[in-house]
Structure formats: C-alpha cells, structure tokens
Image (cartoon, rainbow, N blue to C red):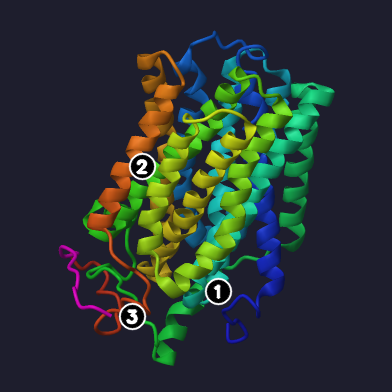
Amino acid sequence: MSELSHGIRVNLGQFLHQLLQVLLVGMTIGMMRTVVPALAETEFGVPRGSFTLLVAFVVGFGIVKGTLNFVAGRLAESWGRRRVLLIGWVTAMPIPVLIYFAPSWDWIVVATLLLGVNQGFTWSMTQTAKLDLTRPDQRGLTIGFNEFAGYVGVAIAGIVTGYLAAELGPRLGLLIFGLAVIGLATLLTLLFIADTLPWAKKEKPMMAASGATLHPRYPLGVSAKPTTREIFTLVSWRDRRFFALCQAGLVEKFVDALIWVFYPVFLYSKGVSLPGIGWIVGVYGFTWGGAQLLTGRLSDHWGRHRLNVAGMWICGAGVALMLLGEGAAWWSFSAAVSGLGMAMLYPNLSAAVADISAPHWRASAIGTYRFWRDLGYGVGALGLGLAAASTQSVEGAFWFVAGAMALSGLGLAILGEETHPRLKPAAVPMLRSEPAGAVPPAPTFERKTP
C-alpha cells in the first residue's frame, strides 16, 4: 500500500467520482420531497387532517435509514465501501415503479422504506470513502463538499420533479426521473468507483510512522478490535462528547422532517404551486448545500463546537420565522435562514465525530452517529404528527421543532467540547489502542486548554 497517499489533491479523480455519487444520492431522496407530500391527499388517498398517517412514511424512513447507517458502517469494514454502495443502489431500483403504480399511501410507505435502505448504504459510504481519502486537517472541508453535493442534489430534484409533475403528471414524472437517476448511479458505481478501505487501513500506521503532528483526543480504553456493542455504547452514551453530538444530530433531523412533510403541505394550503414549492424548499437546500463549502472549511480553522451550537439555534430560528410573515419572498428568506444554520452544524457534527474516532473503527463510529441522527427523522416526524394533531394545525409542528432545536443546542453547548486535534489536542499522542479484550474503563477527559 506504499503507493497510497492521503489528501484531496492526490486523490482528486476518485474524490470527484464520490462527489457525483452523493449528488445522485441527494437527487434520489429529493424526488420524494415536493410532489409526494403536497399531493398526499389528492393523489394517494391520505384523508384531510390525518397528520399521523401523513408522517408515517417519514417515521418508517428514519427508523430504516438510521439502522442501516450503523449496519453499513460495520459491513464497510469487512466487505469494503464499494460493495455496500452498490447494494444501496440496487435496493433503490423498485422505488419509482412502486410510486407509479401505488394504489394507496401504503405503497408510498413501502417505497420510502426502500429509500431508507438506499440512503443508509449510499450516503454513509460516500462520506466514509471521502474521509478515507483525505487528511485529518481536511475533514471539515471534505464533509462540507460531501453535504454540499448531496443537498444541492436534493434541491435540484425537488424543483425538477415539481415541473415534471406539472407537465407529465406526478406518477409519470417521478418514474422517469427516478429511473434515470438510479440507473445512472448504479452504472457509474460499477465503472468508476474504487474501494477506499485500503486508504483507511493505511492511515493509522502512517500517522504512527510520521510522528503524528496532530494528536486526536480518542476515548481511552477502546479494544484493538472493538465489538459492535463496544462501539455502539461508546458513541451513544459512554463518551459524553459523542453523546452530545448524537443528541444534536437526532434533533436537527426534526427540521429536515418538517421541511419534508409539512413545508409542502403548509405552502400548498397557502396557494403556492408545485414548482413554487420546489423553489422555496429549494432555497433551503441550495443555502444548506452551498454554504457548507464555507462552513466545513471554516471549522478546520475555527473549530467545530461554536459553529455547531450557533447552527442549532439559527436553524431553529428559521423554522419559527416561517410562521411570522407571508408571501414567497418571506418564506424563501425563512428557508434560507434554516439552511444557513443547517450548513453551520451539519458537516461539522460529522467532522467532530470523525475527529475523535480512531481510523480502524471510524466507519462504525460514523455509522452509530448516523444511526441516531437519522433516527431523528422517525422521532421528529412522530413528534410533528402529534404536535399537529394536538393543535389541529401544521403550525403546531413548526413551534415543536423550533423549541426542540433551542433546547438541543443548549445541551450541546453544555455537554460538548471542541474536538479539532489541532485546536484541542490530547496531552500525549493516543495512537495505540488497549490490548484486545481489555475491559473499557469509564471515559475520562482532559481539561487542558490548547
């Protein structure tokens, strides 16, 4: 493996192929975001005011995607990244067909469950693969690029499918768009994607041999070959830093669930057309995606923690602003505020997890974080449905999400800390794991300033 090097520039070709993949991943989920919720009543038979039935497809999506994120991380360490990515694309192939022939909302729920499998495998692998290829000091930029491409794809798909639905009808428009995107992604994976697992295996010995100028604050007491249970419990609650990041990741998905389910319903009830909904929701996606090119890079210089906390609060404020005015310009501005806040926190929560995860179990740690984060779709959608049902209005769901973001941001501020290895390094290099089979002690944290 001596010929393998880390860094964006030296791996630019493969890095760009992975970026194209995540663009197509975003377009796959984006095709479900404008047309399907807005026409749930008229096209797919959801009774008016049935908020819990309306959110059922996002609840199922969140549970499946969250679980498959963790499974994908574990499989990727034995099967390799490319094989898991390919499985994700094959799983997506029936989705547009199910939507086209759907006689009821139940079929949409099944299609969305398959979408959860697809997203859990494909988005996890594109992120993990790019982290394999790049250097530790490029992680914020790397995840910023990854999420930029993905959420620009979401925004593009929402706009394009809105127009296709208006011209061809919702079912035919989604069928053509979905088959084109999924077919292209599968073909590109087969022809151009390399497995990046060898880069991950090389990273640890490379750091040790170089003297490792960056000393990450890895948790103490992790086995040389940690079990699934060990990594899951460590990231979920045994390490306070991981716990703070996971709860923030879970709650920030409440915003995305709201925008997926209730933004189209809210805007459609205000008389906005399907293309108009696509553009307003697209402002959120474009702002989120584009700003991550800046916010991911900034976190490599300024640190992750402050951007994450501020992003939680700004994103929640944008949700509240949506209800405080009228008109396409105001709604677009509110969506942009939420998108900016999401851009501040989204790549940098993931980068913070990567900062304190050792190379040989990083994919599993990222998978665990992504499990909790994307479970937020399910938890959030359920909360949205209950909030809307209890108030008999979609506005109740907006206030529920705004309050949850404020509280979660406060929890992150109190329980979290800076994780960038240059800004808050370990007192001594922690590049060697404990012997296999060692009993993990309770995690400890050094409180020295950088």
Which is more N-terminal, label 1 or label 3? Answer: 1
Q: Which residue is mark 2?
A: 405
Which amino acid type corresponds to the residue marked 1 in the rendered image?
Thr
Q: Which is nearer the eye, 296 or 434? A: 296
Residue 130 lies in the magenta stretch: no
Residue in view at x 68 percent, y 69 percent: 14
Q: Which residue is mark 1?
A: 134
Q: Which residues are magenta?
A: 440-450
Which amino acid type corresponds to the residue marked 3 in the rendered image?
Leu
Q: Which residue is mark 3?
A: 431
Q: Secondary structure at mark 3?
A: loop
Q: Is 87 placed left or right of 232 in the picture? A: right
How packed mark 2 is, by other alpha carbons closer than 10 Å (few <14, some 14-19, many 20 or more), is: many
Instruction: For residue 49, say whether it is visible.
Output: yes
Instruction: For residue 198, say whether it is visible.
Output: no
Tag nearer the camera, 2 or 3: 2
